[in-house]
Image (cartoon, helix red, strand yellow):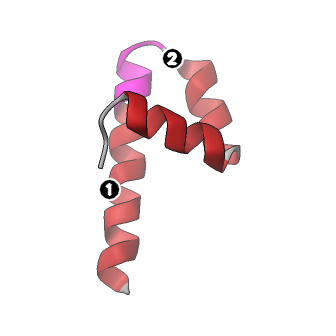
C-alpha cells in the first residue's frame, strides 16, 4: 500500500513540475482540486 501511495505522490510531483515548467499555473491550480482534470492532464502529458 505504501508503494502505491509513493507512486501517486511521485506522479503528482511530476505533473506539477511539467505544468509549472510549461507556464501552466492555472492548470496546476485546478489539478489540485479536480481529480478528473488531473487524470486528463496526466494522460495528456504521458505520466503513468
Q: Quadrant of residue 4?
A: bottom left
x, y percent for residue 45: 35, 29
Regarding residue 16, the answer to whether it shows in the image is no
Q: Secondary structure at mark 1?
A: helix
Above or below, comparing residue 9 to residue 16 in the picture: below
Regarding residue 36, the answer to whether it shows in the image is yes
**Would you say 40 lies left or right of 42 here?**
right
The span shown in magenta is 18-23
Residue annotated with mark 2: 24
Residue at 40 percent of width and 73 percent of height: 5
Q: Quadrant of residue 8?
A: bottom left
Residue at 48 percent of width and 33 percent of height: 41
* CA gap, disc 1 and disc 2: 19 Å
State which tag comes first along the sequence, 1 or 2: 1
**Would you say 30 lies left or right of 40 here?**
right
**Secondary structure mostly seen in the magenta stretch:** helix
**Would you say 33 lies left or right of 17 here?**
right
Residue at 51 percent of width and 17 percent of height: 24
x, y percent for residue 6: 33, 70
Q: Residues within 10 Å of mark 2 (few under 14, many from 20)?
A: few
Q: Secondary structure at mark 2?
A: loop
Residue annotated with mark 1: 10
Q: Could you say which disc has been placed on residue 27 in the image?
A: none
Outermost residue on the top side: it is 23
Above or below, comparing residue 47 to residue 2 in the picture: above
Amino acid at each position: 500500500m505504501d508503494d502505491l501511495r509513493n507512486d501517486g505522490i511521485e506522479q503528482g510531483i511530476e505533473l506539477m513540475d511539467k505544468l509549472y515548467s510549461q507556464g501552466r499555473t492555472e492548470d496546476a491550480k485546478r489539478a489540485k482540486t479536480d481529480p478528473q482534470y488531473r487524470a486528463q492532464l496526466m494522460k495528456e502529458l504521458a505520466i503513468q
